[in-house]
Amino acid sequence: MHDERVFREAIRLLDNGQNAHQVATKLGVPWGTVRYWRAGGRSLTRRVSYNLCRPGDCPWLPPRSGAAYIYLLGLYLGDGTIQKVGRSVQLRAFLDDRYPGIQDECAAAISSVTNGGVVSRVQRVGCTVIGSYSLHWRCLFPQYGAGRKHLRTIELADWQQLLADEYPERLLRGLIHSDGCRDLNKTKGHEYPRYSFSNRSDDIHAIFQRTACRLGIRYTTKQFVTSIARRPDVARMDEIIGAKY
């Protein structure tokens, strides 16, 4: 029977993103025991640990890397979900297999935010799901909720907006990597490059547009698309986004 303090420390490390092998090695506890605790063993204490963090107590706030977090926020607003899975919570980003570099950048951002936490990759038809388990995702992304994002209000918390104002390029990069593209617009015998951001949520478009304005980038809107087409603005976006890879 392990000491209660060992159990509580193991739960704290697991909730901070460390895997069972790391926790077992650090605490000198058998790996199978840590897996049992992670799955809900000693259930009364484990259920308590699965409550939301109290205000001001989340060990992941403020984010360890503001730049990585804001990029991840952009991906989440576009192609991400947060779902309760068993007794934990999973962040997932569904990313096109044509762009393995974006998948790697997403995984690196998750690892940075979670301080080296476990990042999973699950192959689907035409895409890879980049995921990570932790209750703290609900603290980091208070926009989570039931139903599709365009059917509910999406607003940044004050602390998120402060980070978005500090790293606007990273937010635009994440949003374009998830729901955006750079293409050639052809009209009246002319063609020119433009960036398009497509999303059904007016609130998420407002976040994109507010961030573009902060960088002095002008845009136009039409239905569910925000477009950036003026030559100097496209050039500025090229500096921020680069080629999808």
Image (cartoon, rainbow, N blue to C red):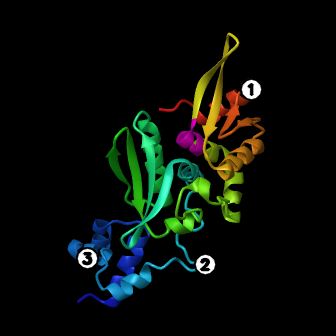
Label 3: which secondary element: helix
Q: Earlier in the sequence, mark 1 or mark 2?
A: 2
Residue 229 percent location from the top left of the image:
71, 27
Label 2: which secondary element: loop
Q: Is residue 230 above or below residue 148?
A: above
Of marks 3 and 1, the one in the foreground: 1
- The question of residue 177 being in magenta is answered with yes
Residue 139 percent location from the top left of the image:
55, 69
**Depth order, front residue of 125/66:** 125
Of marks 1 and 2, the one in the foreground: 1
Marks 3 and 1, Cα distance to the nearest angstrom?
Answer: 57 Å
Q: Earlier in the sequence, mark 3 or mark 2?
A: 3
| CA neighbours of label 2 inside 10 A, class few (<14), some (14 to 19), many (20+) | few
Q: Earlier in the sequence, mark 3 or mark 1?
A: 3
Marks 1 and 2, Cα distance to the nearest angstrom?
Answer: 44 Å
For the record, the magenta segment spans 174-180
Tag 3 near tag 2, CB within 8 Å = no
Residue 231 percent location from the top left of the image:
73, 24
Label 3 amino acid?
Tyr
The residue sitting at 38% across, 73% down in the picture is 87
Residue 124 percent location from the top left of the image:
34, 44
Q: Quadrant of the N terminus?
A: bottom left
State the image quarter where residue 191 is shown: top right
Circle 1 residue: 230
Q: Is residue 117 above or below residue 56?
A: above
The residue sitting at 51% across, 48% down in the picture is 79
Circle 2 residue: 55
Label 1 amino acid?
Arg
Circle 3 residue: 36
Label 1: which secondary element: loop
